[in-house]
Image (spheres, rainbow, N blue to C red):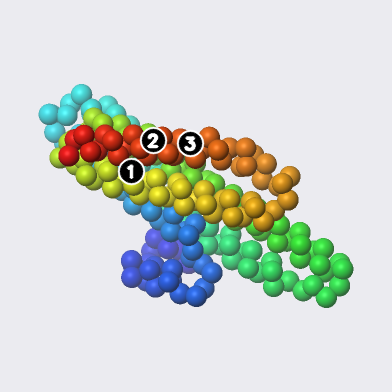
Amino acid sequence: MTWSNTTLSEFEAAVKSSDPTPGGGTVAAVALGQAAALTVMVADLTLASDRWAEAHGLAAEAKQVAEAVLPLAAAFADADSTAFDAVVNAFKLPKGTDAEKDVRRTAIRLATLGAAEVPFETAQLACTLLPHVLALAEHGNSNAASDAGVASLMATAAAKGAVFNVMINLNALPEDMGEAMRAALPSMEDDIRRIGRSCMEAVRQRL
């Protein structure tokens, strides 16, 4: 299943179903794609007006970054569902003998690690986009300040939601698995909060 090729109603129907996927990690990645799309829009509205000529450089950079984020966010949405499906399938492995239990345990742990890695990439990508959203919120076309605000909210929600999914999977694993992600999360969360607050302050000042 490629979620970017479904209609909005089809995607929402899949999310609300009793199936384990798509879940929060996929929704976070989709939200990131929406944030990137809005970022491109605000950048274009800034670039189209000579009034905002001083912001054309940062708008062009924001557009370039956001356009690169769009296909990656779509890919991560699909990958998140695939990764968690692997966890579900690992739990279905036989466990009748000690050998089977060992194989099953290893499979579950490796699949769970994969299910943490995908939303971690989503969160990293959101953190790449957020500074450019902030730049547009502060200096871009003020007529699109509300759109920059929604972009920042969507990107922040995507980042925070992805982090939640990283945490819940890492917490199911031994501490020696996913060490790099565990070490990176605190500073990542600080950056998300800081930039998100700055975006909101900038938007409110320009409304």
Q: What element carries label 3?
A: helix
- Asked whether residue 63 appears in the rendered view, the answer is no
Cα separation, mark 1 vs mark 2, equals 9 Å
On screen, 4 above or below 207? Answer: below
Query: Which residue lies under the disc numbered 1?
Result: 152
**Residue type at numbered disc 3:** Asp
Q: Which residue is drawn at 48% across and 60% down?
A: 24
Q: Is mark 2 on a helix, strand or loop?
A: helix
Name of the residue lying farthest toward the top: 54
Q: Residue at x 67, y 41 (%)?
A: 179
Q: Where is residue 206 in the image (x, y as percent from the top left)?
A: 19, 35
- Asked whether residue 164 appears in the rendered view, the answer is yes
Q: Position of residue 160 (x, y in %)?
A: 46, 48
Q: Earlier in the sequence, mark 3 or mark 1?
A: 1
Query: Which residue lies under the disc numbered 2?
Result: 195
**Residue type at numbered disc 1:** Ser
